[in-house]
Amino acid sequence: MSVIRVGSVGLGGISSGVHLPGIRRSPDLKLTALCDINPERLRERGEQYGIPEDRRFTDYRDLVSCPDVDAVDISTPNNVHLEVALAAARAGKPYCCEKPVTMDTAEAELLRDATRAAGVKSMICFSYRYKAAARYLRSLVAGGRFGRIHHVNMQYYQAWGLAEANCSLVWRYVKSVAASGALGDLGCHALDLVSFVTGQRYTRVAAHLDTIIHERRLPDGSGTGPVDVDDFSNILCSMTDGISASFQISRFAYGRGNYQRMEVYGEHGALVYHLDRVPGVDELEICDASTGKKYVPAEIPEEFRVDQMQSFADLLNGTDDGLNADIDDGVENEILLDGILRASEEGRWVTL
């Protein structure tokens, strides 16, 4: 392949904010088909991106089988990921898929096996692997400058769950559609990012998950419905190489937009990664002997600046850097999420 023709399934917020603009920016990708169950949204995105009506679909199976589609981009709610990705793999078409990749480990393993059997490439969209500050942090840790890593503390905070935000019972608050709440929505990103920057895996977990607002208004205004997923999650993890990691994940963090902070403490120094301390900006601070044991802002080399959807194109063209998450990473993440849910429910450490 050179220019890859992409069909995109699911045209909501993450598609409009990340996937479709990224496809448009890439010289190696061409958007050729769209699919959404909302006819008005489908019409709007079709006109915005110049997609003819005969390549605007309300059934993902029609998009997957379209001869003008080489690869499938999946940005649907979580409970639809499996069936769309399976259809793509079985049609011999590579896919990129939003996270969490499926509803549970069993589904993820089913998709992994089908992907392997079909011999197609996959990318799971753990978006923060593409932040330059995170990639530079990863390089510094791997280079050994800070010695063995002892502790990692990670926060991921948003505010849109607060009562004053008056958010309705959207799909992210419904277990049958989302599988989990803040954990799967935000936590899976944080968990992947810590593994990505340290190069280590998780071995056991303990957790406290809970719900703050138990009823929300229905989107159609007909009443209220129950929230049956977590609003926040506090997680403790043991990792390989002896790393102790902690996570605080919440949709109830007043004044936060899409805020992340990761502190990495090693034998010979420390690093602090920030996202959205300055709105939309990722930053890195370094503290070691060379900085006088003071935290100073790091200049991030240009080589660490990459684009998520261009990385998908590079993967398909065989020119990627090997740092994308694939279906195997998606399975590992699902095992971790399932373990955290079980740890919270049972009030104990769970070995993975």
Image: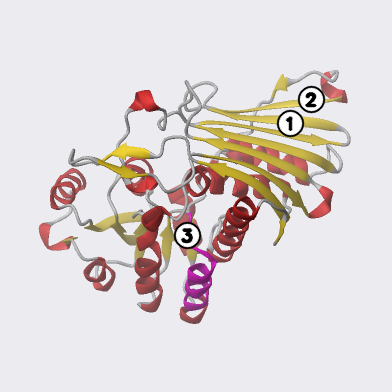
Give the residue at x 55% y 45%.
187
Pick the residue in front: 342 or 27. Answer: 342
Q: Amino acid at mark 1?
A: Leu
The boundaries of the magenta stretch are 100-115
Vertically, is 136 above or below 338?
above
Vertically, is 110 above or below 23?
below
Sequence-first tag of 1 and 3? 3
Q: Position of residue 288 (x, y in %)?
A: 84, 26
> Which residue is disc 3 drawn over?
101
> Which residue is disc 1 drawn over?
271
Residue 138 visible (yes or no): yes
Q: Nearer the viewer, mark 1 or mark 3?
A: 3
Sequence-first tag of 3 and 2? 3
In 3D space, how far apart are the residues under numbered discs 1 and 2 (Cα atoms)?
6 Å
Q: Main secondary structure of the magenta part?
A: helix
Quadrant containing the N terminus is: bottom left
Which element type, helix, strand or loop, lies under badge 1?
Answer: strand
Vertically, is 174 above or below 121?
above
Give the residue at x 35% y 39%.
215
CB within 8 Å, label 1 to label 2 = yes
In 3D space, how far apart are the residues under numbered discs 3 and 2 (Cα atoms)?
36 Å
- Which color mode does the image show? secondary structure
> Which residue is disc 2 drawn over?
287
Mark 3 Cα shell of 10 Å, populated few (<14), some (14-19), many (≥20): many
In 3D space, how far apart are the residues under numbered discs 1 and 3 (Cα atoms)?
30 Å
